[in-house]
Amino acid sequence: MCGIVGYIGPREAYPIIIEGLKRLEYRGYDSAGVALFDGTDLKVSKTKGKVADLEKRSEQEITKHGSVGIGHTRWATHGVPNDVNSHPHISNSGDLVIIHNGIIENYESLKQELISRGYTFKSDTDTEVLINLIEDVKKQEKVKLGKAVQIALNQVVGAYAIAVFDKNKPEEVVIARLGSPLAVGIGEDEFFIASDASPFIEYTKDAIYLEDEEMAIIRFHKGIKIRKIKDDSLVDPYVQKLQMNLEEIEKGGFDHFMLKEIYEQPKAITDTYRGRLLREEAIIKMAGIEDNMKKFLNADRIIIVACGTSWHAGLVAEYIFEDLARIPVEVEYASEFRYRNPIITEKDVLIAISQSGETADTLAAIKLAKSKGAFVFGVCNVVGSSIARETHAGAYTHAGPEIGVASTKAFTTQITVLTLMALRLARAKGTISSSDFRRHLLELEMIPQKVEESLKSDAHIKMISDIYKDVGNFLYLGRGYNFPVALEGALKLKEISYIHAEGYPAAEMKHGPIALIDENMPIVVIATRKGHYEKIVSNIQEIKSRKGKIIGIVTKGDVQVKELADHVIEIPETFELLSPLLTTIPLQLLSYHIAVLLDKNVDQPRNLAKSVTVE
């Protein structure tokens, strides 16, 4: 994925674009660029590196005046990260300029066709092919830019979000999307273009989100027209009111967004169940469930599809749904789901989980399930996102913006939503008693306070991190509800510290991983009192007999594991099915502190982007 920013209006475009790129840098940070029309000519500056590098380069290369411009921060797909492959890209004539998020899959055949017509290429990107294709269509068909973009996009295969303008007609910007998000902020006689709303929230609260296969022609003083790319039909724009605040996307005194977001989890979990968990009335209110209760109750099974951290949340949900609601659940990697010809029927419910609501593989799984007649329910964080629009119904997590690439509050809020769903379905099916239902509501309501208590171990965890920061491998073990948490803990460490780590069910240790254990191998063991405690203690004893170093995540007041482990991190006691909401907190902090001590870029780890919007 990449970050797109654009502006057309009476203001100076450059500062808006640069600040917008900084807010979108979580979407890609291997190179960045900007293109402005200064009233006379097109000015372009781009470079390998971060937006800060672009700022320095722009000081030397361009005058930063102009009221129309586009900018881009890149996560490389076609072509290595370097100055030449950076966006924006210019057509052979020098007239047209483009920024692009996505992949043009048939770019090579298009490129060869254009070469045969005399076009030359400086970069290795599919994007340079697209801008020259647009130019060729404009020239051959003798049409305006908007029409040329439409005709060209009907020839490409792949995914895209693009912004294009012609230096000879700088009062107009053309944008389009298929599979990659694109939003338009509507100001007073001005327009903002971005991959999400964060670059323009201080200027306007009104936004339009383009749907797939839509394009828009934005004209200064004349407004916006949206059309379908396939048939050129006009679309009535739907203007949404943004709920996001500027303060939510600033660091708020924390050194990194990831740490801020770890500490935001008590509030995020509260916001997730607020208005849904009504403890005094002993009810859970979720419109997406109430309006579709028969779909869930009559389902043969629930299929959960997700990627990465969201997949781990889905694994936790599998335990919760089957335990409480007694509905069979299968959890699938969205990236594999559609490629194995899965059996899907009208009696299946598919739950798609995604923080961004834009994950390409998850969107593809949704479309496949819908084509087979399944009912599709979305769990995502971003209002107006593609998954929110593609699904039949859904629930937002209300976690607020998550900027750090390594998801933290997304995980806990997803589990919170899924727990609410399972409890509501269990009550409807009668698989949980009234008294147990009330006890679960009370305990879930107390989770934010218990997360706050868990965060008080931060300094202790930092001390443990310093001891193990230089090891080459970690092993994470958990059982039952906390096996997925072990997977998530290992993923967090890999993502931001680049230390190899594996998560395993503790009982599987003897089926292979035990061969790795020696005095140099730290093993993080989730050993809470609820759930297979004696079995976990037995696993710890096996590790100690092989000189492994134990970091135990234990229930407050634990004695038995404390005697065996080299280090323990305590969490408050809670029900077993809610324990992942607490056990994940020390694992997030452990990975964070190790990465910081190793001087890694915590918020922008190498090779990763926040949301994978291309395959």
Image: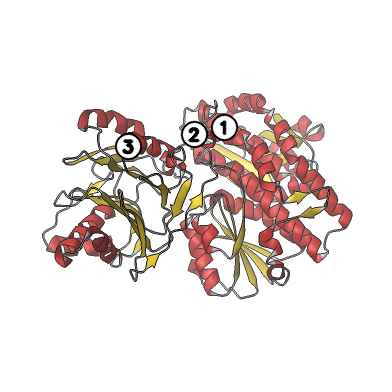
Which residue is rendered at x = 69% and y = 29% of the image? 567
Q: Amino acid at mark 2?
A: Val
Which callout, 2 or 1, points to the residue nearer the camera?
1
Task: Pinpoint residue 593: horizontal percent, then vertical percent.
Answer: 56, 29
In the visual, does 436 lie left or right of 594?
A: right
Q: Please tell me how crowded label 1 is: few (under 14), some (14-19), or many (20+) other residues with Cα within 10 Å.
A: some
Q: Nearer the viewer, mark 2 or mark 3?
A: 3
Q: Find numbered disc 2 in the image and state the secondary structure of the residue it sits on.
A: loop
* Residue reaching furthest to the left: 118
State whether residue 275 appears in this view.
Answer: yes
Measure the alpha-carbon separation of dots 2 and 3. 34 Å
Residue 59 point in image, percent of width and height = 25, 28
Rounded to the nearest whole Å, what is the CA distance between mark 3 and mark 1? 35 Å
Helix, strand or loop under label 3? loop
Q: Amino acid at mark 3?
A: Arg
Instruction: Identify the residue shown where x is 49% and y is 34%.
Output: 602
* N-terminal-most mark, 2 or 3: 3
Residue bearing mark 1: 259
Front one among 615 and 42: 42
Q: Amino acid at mark 1?
A: Leu
Asked whether 594 or 180 is in front, the reply is: 180
Dots 3 and 1: beta carbons under 8 Å?
no
Q: Residue at x 80, y 44 (%)?
A: 443
Discs 2, 1 touching: Cβ within 8 Å: yes
Q: Residues within 10 Å of mark 3 (few under 14, many from 20)?
A: some
Q: Is 282 on the left-hand or right-hand side of 371?
A: right
| Front label number (3 vs 1) | 3
Above or below for 85 versus 472: below
Query: Mark 3 highlights which residue?
Result: 11
Name the residue tied to disc 2: 602
